[in-house]
Image (spheres, grey):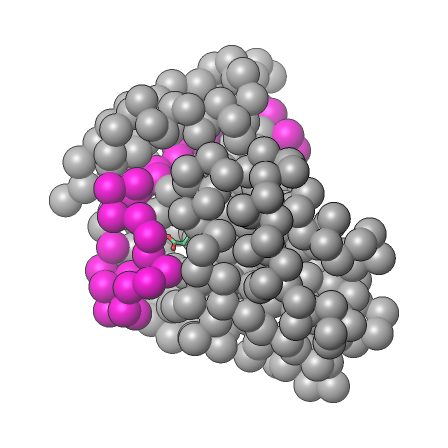
Amino acid sequence: MKDSAIGVFDSGVGGLTSVGELRRILPHENIIFLGDTARLPYGTKSPDTVHRYALEDARFLQERDVKMIIVACGTVSSVMMTKPVFDGSLPYTGVVYPAVAAAVKKTKCKRIGVIGTSATIKSGAYEQAIKDIDDSITVVTKACPMFVPLVENGYTDYGNKITASIVEDYLSVMKQERVDALIMGCTHYPHLSEFFRDYLGDKVELISSGGEAAKFARRVLEAKDLLSDRTEEGKTELYCTDSVELFSENVETFLGESKNLSISKCVLK
Ligand code: DGL
């Protein structure tokens, strides 16, 4: 079990923010990642559809004998708060709790912003999780449905005027409400963090939900004595459900030129 891979899934390349952080903090672990690119975006779908997709994604990873599952998708994680995707036979984490725990620690003025897909914001999951920890915190939420297509289509180059103006439009409420911590509640969003930093200034802490989930997963594996004893570098297997060519371009942008990495197409059942 210790040498089994860590399983990670998302609707697309956003979950690579978790994979990148895992590769950085746990370099000896094997990782299996599934990006369900054929059915992206999840964030505009109904909770029932998101739940059905998530069950298939999780099954794909479970069939590959993983030791833990990271749901590196803010949309699925939010929907999962009311409808769990797992039977509890494996340790797993979504991104909501790890991101919220980090934000509550970071905010000094007790004003936290949350951005995410429409489904995520509609679910109220982040807001509820923050209030469960500290009811006196003001939470400002904003659905940002244009961000995922911008990231998936490569509009991430710093200085891109289209992206900058959409960022300004979505984040103006965060400026007005003077939040000092912003949860990027969709795992795609850290790919736009230079734009967020530029617009909000460096006094606002940006919290990567996917990155925090990876750190949380390390703590879970440590506590369960499930970290690998391997001494050589781990392998990363990436799977997507649509064109490998398109996915590969994004992978290189987000993970850089990486060794020990394979990319294949798969079919979900
Ligand atoms: N990365 C997913 C999330 O965190 C993207 C959502 C989508 O597919 O719309 O919500």
Q: Place residue 178 in its image quadrant.
A: bottom right
- Locate the N terminus by quadrant: top left
The answer to whether any part of residue 85 appears in the image is no
Residue 57 image point, x, y percent: 28, 47
> Is 233 on the left or on the right of 10, as rendered?
right
Give above or below for 201 relative to 228: below
Q: Nearer the viewer, residue 183 or 63?
A: 183
Q: Is residue 43 magenta?
A: yes
Q: Residue at x 64, y 76 (%)?
A: 140
Residue 83 image point, x, y percent: 33, 71
Q: Residue at x 44, y 29 (%)?
A: 250
Give above or below for 196 relative to 78: above
- Locate the C terminus by quadrant: top left
Identify the magenta region: 24-53
The answer to whether any part of residue 37 appears in the image is yes
Quick one: which residue is furthest to the bottom in this view?
136
Q: Residue at x 63, y 63 (%)?
A: 171
Residue 82 image point, x, y percent: 38, 75
Q: Is residue 49 magenta?
A: yes
